Amino acid sequence: MAFDIRPGEAYTIRRKVLKFFGAAFHIYDPQGQVVGYCKQKAFKLKEDIRVYTDESCTTEMIVIKARSMIDFGAMYDVTLPDGSSVGSFRRKGLKSSFLRDHWLVFDGGGRQVAEVIEDGSFLAFARRYVDLVSLFSPQKFTIKKPDGSIVARYRQHFNLFVYRLSVAVERDDPDVDDLVILAGGCLLCAIEGRQSAG
């Protein structure tokens, strides 16, 4: 399967919509090999995303779970299969709903270490209210540290039928685990992909 891979992009997450049964995500490496898979159940009151190493769903890689029912400022914990925390995300609700998406990123100890911010101000605002802008101007996100340094980037592909998101890790960072970066991409596919489909 050919993707528009750009230099530095480590993963491409492809969201396949299953109308009545939720959604499935395939995670590909730059060579197009599946390195992760998750199936998101429909009609769940609390988000519970489990990422496996492949479609057999026998070996978990990470778990992304909401602490409460979906709301404007939901908190999502990222844990290893043994339950140990590697980080978490909190969506800044009102800002994400009306202006541009904004998430706070925490390390395994609960300390805020970065933010995920949707790029662009006007286009981000316009995407929420004009379908054509959303269609022809795919989203981009940046993970930034408090000092402004960039840890990773997410880039939505232009595609009319399938939600795809590429993940580029800009640099190793002691505060932001690579699995947290990947989990952030899965969350964006789950939340943003669902909004785009709706």
Image: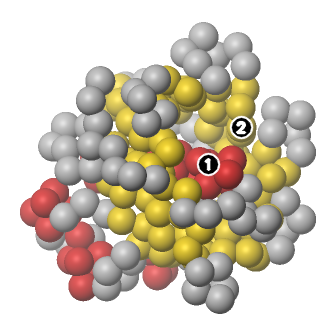
Residue at screen point 71% across, 32% down: 61
**Does residue 175 appear to the left or right of 140 in the view shown?**
right
- Which percent across, then down, holds residue 198? 28, 50
Q: Decide: marks 1, 2 in contact (CB < 8 A)?
A: yes
**Does residue 38 appear to the left or right of 4 in the view shown?**
right
Q: Quadrant of the N terminus?
A: top left
- Which percent across, then down, holds residue 110? 84, 68
Q: Is residue 55 above or below residue 126?
A: above
Q: Nearer the viewer, residue 28 or 46?
A: 28
Q: List the residue tagged with mark 2.
A: 62
Amino acid at pointer 2: Ile
Taking the view exactly as shown, the residue that stands out farthest to the top is 56
Taking the view exactly as shown, the residue that stands out farthest to the left is 132
Q: Is residue 171 visible?
A: yes
Taking the view exactly as shown, the residue that stands out farthest to the bottom is 147
Of mark 1 and mark 2, the one earlier in the sequence is 2
Residue at screen point 48% across, 34% down: 29
Residue at screen point 23% across, 70% down: 127
Image quadrant of residue 13?
A: top left
- Which percent across, then down, holds residue 124? 29, 76
Amino acid at pointer 1: Ala
Q: Nearer the viewer, residue 80 or 194?
A: 80
Mark 1, other Cα within 10 Å: few <14 / some 14–19 / many ≥20? many
Helix, strand or loop status at disc 1: helix
Q: List the residue tagged with mark 1.
A: 183
Q: Nearer the viewer, residue 136 or 194?
A: 136
- Which percent across, then down, holds residue 4? 27, 43
